[in-house]
Image (spheres, rainbow, N blue to C red):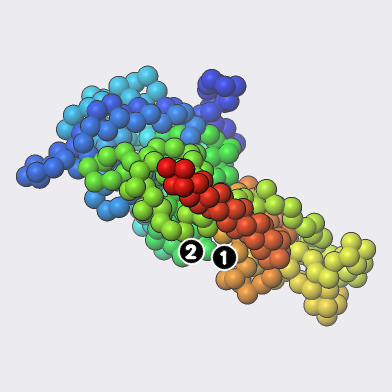
Amino acid sequence: MTSETSTPVSGGRTVAGESIRLEGLVKQYRGQPQPAVKKLDLQIDAGDIVAFVGPSGCGKTTTLKMINRLIEPSAGRIYIGDRDVTTENPDKLRQSIGYVIQSGGLFPHWSVAKNVGAIPRVLGTDKKKIAERTDYLLDLVGLDPEEYSSRLPKDMSGGQQQRVGVARALAADPPVLLMDEPFSAVDPITRVRLQDSLIAIQHELAKTIVIVTHDFEEATKLGDKVLILSEGGHVEQYAAPEEILANPATPFVEEFIGSGATLAHLTLSRVKDVEHNAVVTARVGEPSGEVIGRAKAAGQTWVVVVDDNGRPRSWPSLDELQTKPQVSDYLDRRLPTVAQSSTLNDALDSMLAASQGGTLVTDGRGAVIGALTVARVMDVIRGQLADARDDSSDTYESHTDGAKSS
């Protein structure tokens, strides 16, 4: 199994990514009176996820594609690390940058393994190293290499194809990963799981990731920083999500994030920050009597059946367990799960989609580590809304006091 190369950077943090710097970047299309991007300056720190958001026509996708020169800039410079890549061979540049698009963009007649190994093969990497790298990356994105390596894209779900797309983008160990609305073509539950998977991958690899999204909630969940653009690639605000929500820099930003900004704070509250309940786990084939005894001793009325990697398969009640002498191998495809990196919004969505009063909590590799109830999530939400009302009241009083004094 291969591992990522790492580079020490300031502050004691170790990352595998490189910084990106845009200096006076311009894109002027022929025949258009106004530039699509007008003199953009931007610094993206190594190892950060930065989300580009803004209305249609703001230049977010154009800017993303200029970084790897799928779109050539009309003026300005692009630096990755200390390299000025503006004049580099564009094909070689793109081979050194991971790129993920909607629906994975996989070659339909190639197996998963062949898709993942595409760029390393072009670069002349040894076949054994490509096979090891492919297995490592498929495992990293939550796909069993033995089960999925030989599959064709048509035999996989949209979410699985997108995971393969991420694995392929990471295959050559690039320092930078560009993602163009990668999760917009999947259903909401799959989208949450892909977001959580990306956060887990980033925690392990620490690449520099730039993601374009039309969803401000997704931007605040994924981004260490969020770049809000208006028409012409004008920077309205570039800051951490909590700063944007607390202090919108311009009227444009205030309008863009909308009247739901208070509830958007829930996207900053993570499952890992909320106390969750312990669970009793069981393996397929265990005697039901032993499992029931273990659960009763822990005061539980249900257990979580897990696979060899600790990933949940079902959560039968003790009454259901009593009907069979051994724990059965049943996969509940509606089983509600959220990762530690999931937001409280995600947790509620998971419960509602499965019509359950709780959800299982998993770690970065999908192993179950606890459970979270709807009552606990609602307690946190009520507390946050009360705090928001208090803040609004304080702001109103300060404004009225100022008006009276004047």
Residue 204 in percent (x, y) is at: 58, 37
Disc 1, disc 2: CB below 8 Å?
yes
Q: Is residue 389 left or right of residue 376?
A: left
Q: Quadrant of the C terminus?
A: top left
- Work out whether residue 141 can be spotted: no
Q: Is residue 105 visible?
A: yes
Q: Is residue 214 above or below residue 250?
A: below
**Residue 62 figure quarter:** top left
Q: Nearer the viewer, mark 1 or mark 2?
A: 1
Disc 2 element: helix
Pointer 1 or 2: first along the chain: 2
| Relative vertical location of residue 406 with respect to residue 9 in this rendering, above or below | below
The percent position of residue 375, horizontal first and vertical second, equals 71, 65
Question: Between residues 378 and 307, which one lies in front from this camera angle?
Answer: 378
Can you tell which quarter of the image residue 325 is in? bottom right
Q: Quadrant of the N terminus?
A: top right
What's the mark number on residue 349?
Answer: 1
Near mark 2 (Cα within 10 A), the count class, few <14, some 14-19 or many ≥20, is some
Q: Badge 1 local density, few (<14 within 10 Å), some, or many (20+)?
A: some
Residue type at mark 1 is Asp
Q: Please, which residue is most extreme toward the front here?
A: 405
Residue positioned 41% across, 31% down in the render? 44
The amino acid beneath tag 2 is Pro
Residue receiving disc 2: 188
Q: Marks 1 and 2, how far apart in space? A: 9 Å
Q: Position of residue 206 (x, y in %)?
A: 53, 34
Q: Residue furthest left?
A: 31
